[in-house]
Amino acid sequence: MQVPAYLARKFPEIGEHWPELQPLFIRKHVASGFSIESFEDTDVLMLSKRDFTRIQQQYPSIEPAITRFICERFIAYRNIFFNHVILR
């Protein structure tokens, strides 16, 4: 399996180490549960907490990318909340 395009784009650090990291990810094929309008099939990559901690220790360059992603998602969800809940 090649590194998924989304991971390669969002986390180039993971793409650099994908051959070593791929076996740690569990791949599942599930229906999307995040959008009522989107029911297409979705590939989900899961990672155990133990393996995530191992990746953080072995590849410290990945940590800033993950932190950046979490912050971006937090800001996006906060904006959705303010625009749809508070401002109405």
Image: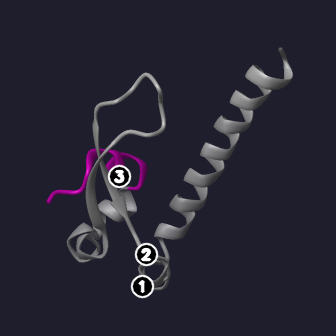
Q: Is residue 8 left or right of residue 47?
A: left
Report the residue at 24% width, 77% height from top.
20
Residue designated by label 2: 48
Which amino acid does the dot numbered 3 rest on?
Answer: Leu
Report the residue at 79% width, 27% height from top.
82
Report the residue at 48% width, 85% height from top.
57
Which quarter of the picture shows residue 21? bottom left
* Furthest residue in direction left, as rendered: 1
Q: Name the element at disc 2.
A: loop
Residue span colored magenta = 1-11
Residue designated by label 3: 7
Question: Who is closer to the viewer here, 52 or 48?
Answer: 48
Question: How far across and down, in percent of the image, does residue 41 sit?
Answer: 26, 38
- Which is more N-terminal, label 3 or label 1? 3
Question: Who is closer to the viewer here, 47 or 41?
Answer: 41
Q: Name the element at disc 3.
A: helix
